[in-house]
Image (spheres, grey):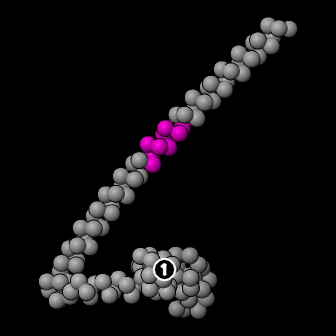
Amino acid sequence: MLDALLFASAVNRAATKNQSSLAGKQASRVATDVRHQTEYIKSDVEKLFMITEALWTILKEQHGYTEDDLIARVEAIDMRDGVLDGRVAKSAVKPDCPECGRKLMGRRPVCLYCGTEVILDPFSR
C-alpha cells in the first residue's frame, strides 16, 4: 500500500513538472511573439514619423504653412471631443448608408442591409 502511495506521488510530481515545463515553453513562445510584434510596431511608427516629416516639409516649403498653423490644426483635432488631451476622439456616431439610410455596422465597407459599397473616412476611429 505504501509503495502504491509513493508511486502515485512520484507520478503526480512528474506530471506537475511536465505541465510546468510545457507552460514555461508556451509562455516563452508568447513572449517571443510579443517582442516580434513590438519590433514591427516600432518600425511602422518610425516609417510614419518619416512620412509625416516629409509631408510637413512639403507643406512648409511649397505652400507656406507655419509651425503655428500646424499647432492650431492639431489642437483643433484634439478638441473635437472637448478635451485637450493629446488623443483623437473616437467617433461615437456610426455613419448612415448613403443608399438605404440605415446605420453602418462596424468598419465594414459594405452596408449589411442593402449591399451598397461605402467609402469610409480613412481617419475615423
Q: Which residue lies at the image location 39% right of the left edge and 48% below the top edge?
A: 36
Left or right: where 74 falls relative to 88? left
Q: Nearer the viewer, residue 96 or 125?
A: 125
Q: Position of residue 119 (x, y in %)?
A: 44, 83
Labels in figure, total? 1
Q: Which residue lies at the image location 20% right of the left edge and 83% below the top edge?
A: 59
Q: Is residue 44 magenta?
A: no
Q: Which residue lies at the image location 59% right of the left edge and 92% below the top edge?
A: 101
Instruction: Give the quarter of the image for residue 4.
Output: top right
Left or right: where 11 falls relative to 18? right
Q: Nearer the viewer, residue 79 or 102?
A: 79
Q: Position of residue 28 (x, y in %)?
A: 49, 38
Query: Could you classify mark 1 by the number of other residues whose Cα lies within 10 Å: few (under 14), some (14-19), or many (20 or more)?
Result: some
Q: Nearer the viewer, residue 123 or 65?
A: 65
The residue lying furthest to the left in this view is: 61
Q: Is residue 46 visible?
A: yes
Instruction: Give the quarter of the image for residue 5.
Output: top right
Which secondary structure type mostly characterizes the magenta part of the structure? helix
| The N terminus, quarter of image | top right
Q: Is residue 114 visible?
A: no
Q: What segment is highlighted magenta in the picture?
A: 26-34
Instruction: Give the quarter of the image for residue 45.
Output: bottom left
Q: Position of residue 105 (x, y in %)?
A: 59, 78
